[in-house]
Amino acid sequence: MLPPLRLPLPEDAYTGSADREAPPCWWGRARWLAHCLALYDENYSALRAAQSVESVSRKTFTAYLIAESSGADYATGRNSRVTVGRLQREVARSESTIHRCRRLLARLGCRTVVFRGRQRTLAERLESWKRNDRARGWAAVSALHESTALPVDNSAVKTLLEQGFGTPPERSSGFSFLSRSKSVSSAEDEMKRRAPRDIDTRSRRKISRAYDQRALLLAEKCRRDERMPLWVRRISRSQLAAALTRYAIAGWQADDVHGAFEEFRISGKKLITTPDRPVGYLCHILRFVPEDVPPALLDRARTVAAEEAERAAKRQLFAEMRAAAVNAAAADSPGRTAARSVIAQLAHQNVGNARARARQADAESRAKARWTNDEADR
């Protein structure tokens, strides 16, 4: 396979002209890093107060300097072709933060761009594809050097060197770190959410969004209902609760959500089995059903009416049997007296059982509400 396409720089890229001077070379990567940090310590506060530069923390700036210098020639500091995407991965910061770091470094006078990046031409794109290179543009080429705009205290540079950036590797290409790896968290640690090496007092505790308890209960029932499509059961409980909040407040149950799917299918619309946006598709299905008219409300009313009729029939039969048993003997007979005693005892026992069931149901509902709140906080 052909090697990747590389853009040759003009012959006068590093030579001076009438409008600009030739960029100098650095004295070494470690000295350049210490030089830039000394400039930051001495001038950042004043530049920031004068609103000449944007906000960049020292930790972020240090990580950026290490990543930016990794692409420069080890001997001269020139030919640095580090892309913004690579800097984002190695510094673990956003694109806007990388641009702020580059503007700050240019304001300190330690980076000179000799070739500004541009999009590739059609011929260059075709040639790149032949070489299995999918890049769409050319990265900017810059030279890293000591400041040409601001003075620096050499004793501060020497102190920073003694504090331990260590000796850079023999080749800077491919190495984005120095031997002192604890000076900043690596991009890999940041991306994998590992524990930071020092305490960041600026971080704020993430607060979970609070959902209505009825919506959370309805979402959990829908996720456990086997009648629901698989893509509905795979939606997270918080996302499902957000989509079902107004329906849960209106009194919907899992049967109503299933009924909405049935009405959507009966109306002649095709039900997608694997939607790209499950939550949005669920909201699209539910919007065809008025929230104040749950689809399974009539079925539940019929079920309640049938159960009530069955209980009424049982009560009537029990009353008839009790009357027959009571009238079978004289009013003052021992059997009738014993029967009245048993009936009174059973009635008292039924009242006690009803109260115990009510207390148990109340305790179960409170426990379920506490469990739902704990899950929502997680």
Image (spheres, rainbow, N blue to C red):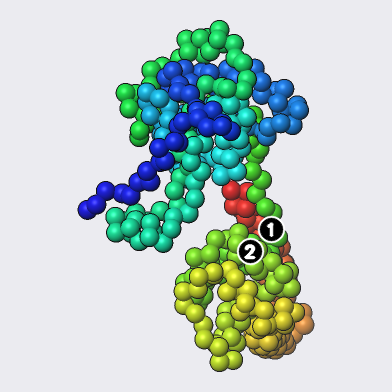
Q: Which residue is rendered at x = 48% and y = 54% of the image?
A: 119
Which of the two residues, 301 or 133, is positioned nearer the viewer here?
Answer: 133
Residue 251 lies left or right of residue 280; in this view the side is: right
Percent from the top left, x then y, of residue 66? 47, 29
Residue 179 placement: quadrant: top left
Vertical side of 301 occupied by 180: above or below: above
Residue 223: image location, x then y, percent: 53, 67
Residue at the front extreme of this rendering: 18
> Would residue 65 be visible to someone looking at this image?
no
Amino acid type, residue under disc 1 in the picture:
Tyr
Q: Give residue 78's quadrant in the image.
A: top left
Instruction: State the image coordinates of residue 101 (x, y, percent, origin top left).
Output: 58, 34
For label 1, the crowd category at 10 Å Cα-Cα, with few meaning under 14, some 14 to 19 and many 20 or more, is some
Q: Residue at x 62, y 16 (%)?
A: 151
Disc 2 residue crowd, few under 14, some 14–19, many 20+, Cα 10 Å: many
Instruction: Please give the residue where the numbered disc 2 appears in the rendered image.
Output: 241
Q: Please report whichever mark, 1 or 2, sits nearer to the chain's N-terminal start.
A: 1
CB atoms of marks 1 and 2 within 8 Å: yes
Q: Is residue 242 above or below residue 209?
A: below
Residue 45, can we see it? yes
- Say left or right for 367 vs 129: right
Residue matched to label 1: 211
Name the foreground residue: 248 vs 121: 121
- Dot 1 falls on a residue whose secondary structure is loop
Alpha-carbon distance for marks 1 and 2? 7 Å
User: Label 2 sits on what residue type?
Assistant: Ala
Quadrant of residue 9 within the rendered picture? top left
Estimate the x, y position of residue 94 in percent, counting from the top left. 56, 43
Foreground of the two, 217 or 165: 165
Q: Secondary structure at mark 2?
A: helix
Q: Residue at left 57%, top 79%?
A: 258
Front residue of this view, candidates 4 and 9: 9
